[in-house]
Image: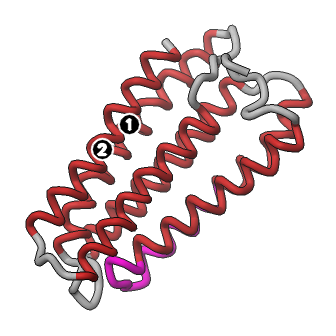
Amino acid sequence: MVERFDTFTLIVLGEVIVGVVSGMIAASQDLLTIVTGVLALVIGLGFWWIYFDIVGGRRARRSGRAITAWILAHLPITLAIAAAGSAMVSLAENAVAPAAPGATAWLLVGSLAVVLIAEIVVVLAFVDGRDERLVYRPLLIAMAAAAVVALLVAFVPLPAWALALVLNAILLAIWFVAAGRFMRAGSWPPGSIDG
């Protein structure tokens, strides 16, 4: 199941790339559109990093509740990544607009928030033992805070490039918290199938 969900998530991440390319084809080919497209593509890479560095390759604990939560939490992750991919089309198309369309901003930040919250559920389904909980606790708090911050960003009318830049900063901050925690624990991530 772990490999199947990892593969499915990887396939859905391709939707982000398709969305960016589709939006850039439909938009005017100027520097701002290209910059916005690259920043949007990096959001997709951020989804990839946080999924595969934090959640990917991990089995749920051997209990019915943990396995059920692990499986069901993967569904909103893939749904939200696919939704973000569709938001990328509008983000790139509106690169030169003074502000990203409200619906696009909400879809994008909502997708990020859903991914983060669902990944918290997945982590809680596989974290086992006090030592692992201590490693993951600050990361889970950072992910929850990042989800709230992402939702707050939607209230600010930002240009498409600035919206993408802020969301990239949020994803990068989570990755840095994860990197610090996993390096202190001595493995990346602790208890993964490969490590």
Q: Quadrant of residue 66?
A: top right
What amino acid does circle 2 point to? Ala
Q: Residue at x 56, y 35 (%)?
A: 52
**In the shown orientation, is residue 167 left or right of residue 50?**
left
Image quarter hosting the C terminus: top right
Task: Please identify the quarter of the rendering in which residue 122 is found.
Answer: top right
Callout 2: few (<14), some (14-19), or many (20+) C-alpha neighbours within 10 Å?
Answer: many
Circle 1 Cα neighbour tier, 10 Å, few/some/many (<14 / 14–19 / ≥20)? many
Percent across and percent down for residue 82 are 30, 44
Q: Position of residue 175 (x, y in %)?
A: 65, 53
Cβ–Cβ under 8 Å for marks 2 and 1: yes
Q: Is residue 91 magenta?
A: no
Amino acid on which the number 1 mark rests in the picture: Thr
Q: Which residues are magenta?
A: 144-162
**Which of 22 and 154 lies nearest the eye of the viewer?**
22
Q: Secondary structure at mark 1?
A: helix
> Is 34 placed left or right of 190 in the picture?
left
Which numbered dot is residue 128? Answer: none
Q: Residue at x 20, y 61 (%)?
A: 89
Q: Main secondary structure of the magenta part?
A: helix
Q: Which residue is mark 1?
A: 78
Instruction: Indicate the position of residue 106 as horizontal and vertical percent values.
Output: 35, 66
- Look at mark 2 in the image and give the residue it sits on: 82
In this rendering, position of residue 69 left or right of residue 12: right
The x and y percentages for residue 184 are 89, 43
